[in-house]
Image (cartoon, rainbow, N blue to C red):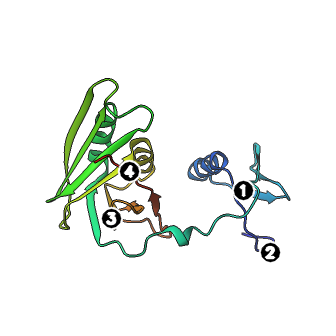
């Protein structure tokens, strides 16, 4: 229940929000959220948590979300995540670059570290019927995204190798519309 009908826009920090999410999943009690000028507080029956607000205005993220994405990939989340973890061990330590070549219902994941003369390559089955596409990503960012989705399958929507990828669950929970944006990295020819 909201006791104040006022509407305002706030930017909250990630850690306290994750804590709030965990508490809401475990606790069955009323939680009071109090917002001040530069901070906010979460009051529960046994304890209180406070955090600073992030200053400034949140950017218009809708402007950077690509709208026309002709390439759609359906893939098992855990299979892709496991392959990324293995292949990323051989990626360049500074960039963390992994290369995805998507074609014929297959994602070929590869990485190399020229400093240590190591490389790795692995194939993951997927549903994809578009033309061949090669794109690079920072492995850690993609793995973090996949770790924060809890569905069996994920969808990756792409337009080309130079534009952002959209990563989303195969099926959103009721009342949830999860969409993650991942910028590609340049791949040397």
Label whose residue precedes the other's in the sequence (3 or 2): 2
- Picture quadrant of residue 171: bottom left
Q: Which labelled disc corresponds to residue 186?
A: 4
Q: CA distance from mark 1 to mark 4?
A: 46 Å
Mark toward the viewer: 1 or 3: 3
Secondary structure at badge 1 equals loop
Q: Is residue 173 left or right of residue 124?
A: right
Mark toward the viewer: 1 or 2: 2
Label whose residue precedes the other's in the sequence (1 or 2): 2
Of residues 62 and 49, the one nearer the viewer is 62
Q: Which labelled disc corresponds to residue 45?
A: none
Query: Hey, which residue is sitting farthest right in the picture?
Result: 37
Residue 17 percent coordinates (x, y): 64, 51
Label whose residue precedes the other's in the sequence (4 or 2): 2
For the point 45% across and 34% down, which residue is it?
94
Mark toward the viewer: 4 or 3: 4
Label whose residue precedes the other's in the sequence (4 or 3): 3
For label 2, the crowd category at 10 Å Cα-Cα, with few meaning under 14, some 14 to 19 and many 20 or more, is few
Secondary structure at badge 4 equals loop
* Residue at which label 3 appears: 160
* Residue at which label 2 appears: 6
* Residue at which label 1 appears: 31
Query: Hey, which residue is sitting farthest top in the picture?
Result: 116
Q: Is residue 66 left or right of residue 48?
A: left
């Amino acid at each position: 229940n909201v006791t104040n009908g006022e509407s305002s826009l706030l930017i909250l920090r990630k850690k306290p929000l994750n804590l709030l999410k965990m508490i809401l999943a475990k606790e069955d009690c009323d939680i009071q959220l109090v917002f001040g000028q530069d901070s906010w507080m979460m009051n529960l029956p046994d304890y209180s948590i406070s955090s600073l607000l992030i200053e400034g205005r949140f950017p218009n993220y809708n402007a950077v979300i690509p709208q026309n994405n002709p390439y759609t990939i359906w893939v098992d989340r855990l299979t892709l995540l496991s392959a990324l973890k293995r292949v990323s061990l051989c990626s360049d330590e500074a960039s963390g670059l992994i290369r995805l070549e998507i074609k014929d219902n297959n994602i070929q994941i590869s990485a190399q570290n020229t400093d240590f003369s190591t490389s790795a390559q692995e194939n993951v089955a997927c549903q994809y019927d578009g033309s061949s596409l090669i794109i690079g990503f920072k492995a850690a960012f993609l793995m973090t995204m996949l770790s924060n989705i809890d569905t069996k399958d994920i969808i990756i929507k792409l337009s080309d190798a130079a534009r952002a990828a959209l990563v989303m669950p195969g099926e959103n929970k009721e009342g949830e519309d999860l969409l993650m944006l991942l910028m590609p990295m340049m791949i040397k020819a």
